[in-house]
Image (spheres, rainbow, N blue to C red):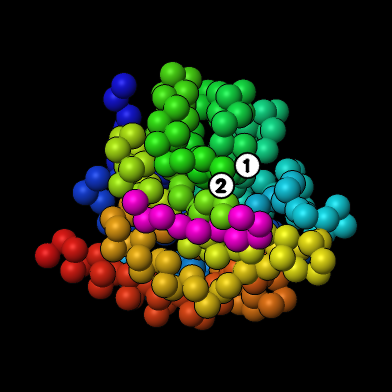
Amino acid sequence: MNVPNPVTIGPVQIGNGRPLALIAGPCVMEPGDMTRRIAGRLVEICGELKIPLIFKASFDKANRSSGSSFRGPGLEGGMEIFRKIKAETGLPVTTDVHETIQAAPIAETVDLLQIPAFLARQTDLLEAAAVTRRPVNVKKGQFMAPWDMKNVVDKLQEFGAAGTLLTERGTTFGYGRLVNDMRAIPQMQATGAPVVFDATHSVQLPSAGEGGKTSSGQREMIPTLARAAVAAGCDALFLEVHPEPDKALSDGPNSLRLDDLPGLLRSLLRIREALAG
């Protein structure tokens, strides 16, 4: 089955022969203008470095460890924020789809639908995303082998997806730890789909904080994994960023400090350039 590669998301193309792209933003849309401020800063950074950018944020963190954790503004409020960001910046945007009934209303605003790792095998959800005629990015389940994602790609193609991306974000190793096997990048590229590397969720330590009520993370390892993934040939990088990660309302321990992003991106571009040469 022919899998479209590269995949077009608004003005951005990800895949064969295209520049390294970035999918980035805060984990969750926070109160006030924080989300729009982060989007504006990302535009400045990526504009200077000429890196194609897709803005990411979650309107609802449906899989929080604790029921009392902050979840976001909800579907209607989240789509309004996305509309403002698109109007102000011209960026394509992406967000998670957790339920089949969410796919169509989200696709009215969002350019790339993202399927969370825990839901990567949910056929009805994949179909609902595919029939919107938006491209779909599926995060590899922490419980899945890279070659298992071929079935996911096949499902999306059968359902008529406008394009498919796969994201590597770590594999469960024992309790409370994820590991990355960089062989997963070329192994998933063998499906025909471009592959994104999620360098921030890959350093997550699930249920490792506050007695299991929140996830922790090893933020300091983000650059190491990102450099390894670019060296392994990933097509795009996924990063959750925040001006003050320690104050973030979700995933702060595994979010990159926004001011650290330009330096990391410059090093990744040098690696990419070396591989091309």
Q: Is 268 left or right of 274, judged from the image as shown? A: right
**Which percent across, then down, holds residue 22?**
42, 59
Question: Going 62% across and 37% down the picture, which residue do you hit?
Answer: 119
How would you classify the magenta stretch by its main secondary structure? loop
Tag shown at residue 142: 2
Q: What is the C-alpha distance between the residues marked 2 and 1?
A: 7 Å
- Give whichever of discs 2 and 1 has the lower sequence position: 1
Indicate the quadrant containing the C terminus: top left, top right, bottom left or bottom right.
Answer: bottom left
Residue closest to the far left: 277
What is the three-letter code of the residue carrying label 2? Gln
Q: Is there a contact, CB below 8 Å, between mark 2 and mark 1?
A: yes
Is residue 258 something one can see in this rendering? no
Q: In what element is the residue under mark 2?
A: loop
User: Taking 258 as reference, is 180 left or right?
Assistant: left
In terms of secondary structure, where does tag 1 sit?
helix
Residue beneath disc 1: 118
- As shown in the figure, which amino acid type bears the numbered disc 1? Phe
Along the viewing direction, whichever of 231 and 110 lies nearer the viewer = 231
The residue range painted magenta reads: 174-183
Q: From where the camera sits, is residue 210 visible?
A: yes
Count the marks: how many? 2
Name the quarter where the N terminus is drawn: top left
Q: List the single residue furthest toward the front.
A: 174
